[in-house]
Amino acid sequence: MKWIIEASKEDIEFARTEAEALLKCGVKVLQDNYLFPQTLPERRMEEFCRRAAYSRKVSRILFVCYEKETEKHIKGYDWDRVYGKSFAVRIFRGDKAKEKDFADLIWDRLRKPRVDLTSPTTQFEFYSLRKYVIACLHFRDIRNDFASRRPHKRPGFSPISMQPKLARALVNISGADKKARILDPFCGTGGILIEAGLMGIRAEGSDIDEDMLSKARQNLKHYHLSIPTKKQDACTIKGRCFAIVTDPPYGKNTRKGDIPALYSKFLINARKVTNTIVICMPSFLSIMPVIRKSGWKVKQRFRFFVQNNFYRYVLVLKK
């Protein structure tokens, strides 16, 4: 089956990268915020919809035609093959005034047509992209209740905690599936661990700050997650894991002069633990020389605006 994904608009390349990591295949940007993955079975898209953070909706492609031939293809398509008990027509990136015209054409092709504009069992969608029209069957809206998991709504609060949407995307971009194990050695209040746990990813967390660990445990318990955490220096972690996914400290609690040394020790030691790191870095630190000297290669880099002139980078590092 072929699919079209409507990505959120914050960062299309970031959304595309997340989609590729989850679907484990190439994903192209069709136009604006629409993504086009390779042909995939339905079960893969079900899992994608359950996990994706930076995508909004998935639809199954029924046919593609030149815009001027749309009515001809509507008349020639077997709509009963994908029809449920009722239908509605929605046009995206096109002339919405044609919704009724397209609905009338589809009505004539159905054995038992019934229109339901509020809760249709079948939603037919049309996307005008460049000179083409893509006719689709709505598959899933992607709804992750990030608002209810914002840091200030957790029992263990810290103002420097990562937002759940970004935390989930970091886990996804690591490429981890349910058989993999990820590690967050700067787990703080547990934002990354929470999102990993809610997706069924095996995770472990550690931090050198007892107060942060206590808050992380409160938060994990609040979401009914059983994820091991322990007090440990991130520069001395041992064992092996699929990926490290983390957001190291760089604020008021860590002296600026100590940060490059901390990152250097952590990155050098992490080479014994994993082949992949997904990590957040502040834009005000010149950290690239530290990364290179520690033996890691930057495979991907994304920049996110935070406030004023402050940006943070998401880096994917490989050995």
Image (tube, rainbow, N blue to C red):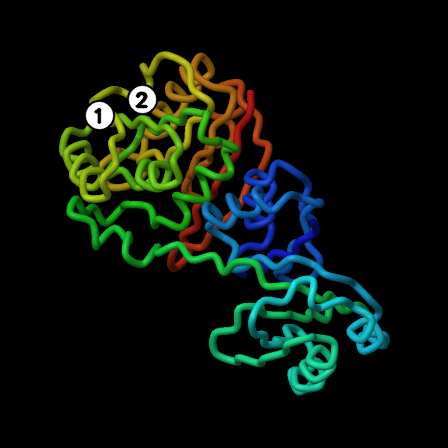
The residue drawn where x is 19% and y is 29% is 209
Q: For the residue labelled by badge 2, is the local secondary structure a helix, a strand or a loop?
A: helix
Q: Are marks 2 and 1 in contact (CB under 8 Å)?
A: yes
Cα gap from disc 2 to disc 1, whole angstroms: 7 Å
Q: In what quadrant of the picture does the C terminus appear? A: top right
**What x and y, as percent, mark residue 229?**
24, 26
Q: For the residue labelled by badge 1, is the local secondary structure a helix, a strand or a loop?
A: loop
Q: Is residue 250 toward the left or the right of residue 86 in the image?
A: left
Residue situated in front as seen by the camera: 137 or 238: 137
| Snapshot quadrant of residue 246 | top left
Task: Farthest residue to the front: give it.
Answer: 111
Q: Is residue 77 toward the left or the right of residue 84 in the image?
A: right
Residue situated in front as seen by the camera: 91 or 184: 91
Which label belongs to residue 234? Answer: 2
Which label belongs to residue 167? Answer: none
| Snapshot quadrant of residue 59 | bottom right
Residue situated in front as seen by the camera: 48 or 215: 48
**What x and y, as percent, mark residue 214?**
14, 34
The residue drawn where x is 76% and y is 69% is 133
Q: Amino acid at mark 1?
A: Ile
9 in relation to 256, above or below = below
Q: Amino acid at mark 2?
A: Ala
**What x and y, as percent, mark residue 156?**
17, 44
**What x and y, as percent, mark residue 39?**
71, 45
The residue drawn where x is 57% and y is 31% is 298
Which label belongs to residue 208? Answer: 1
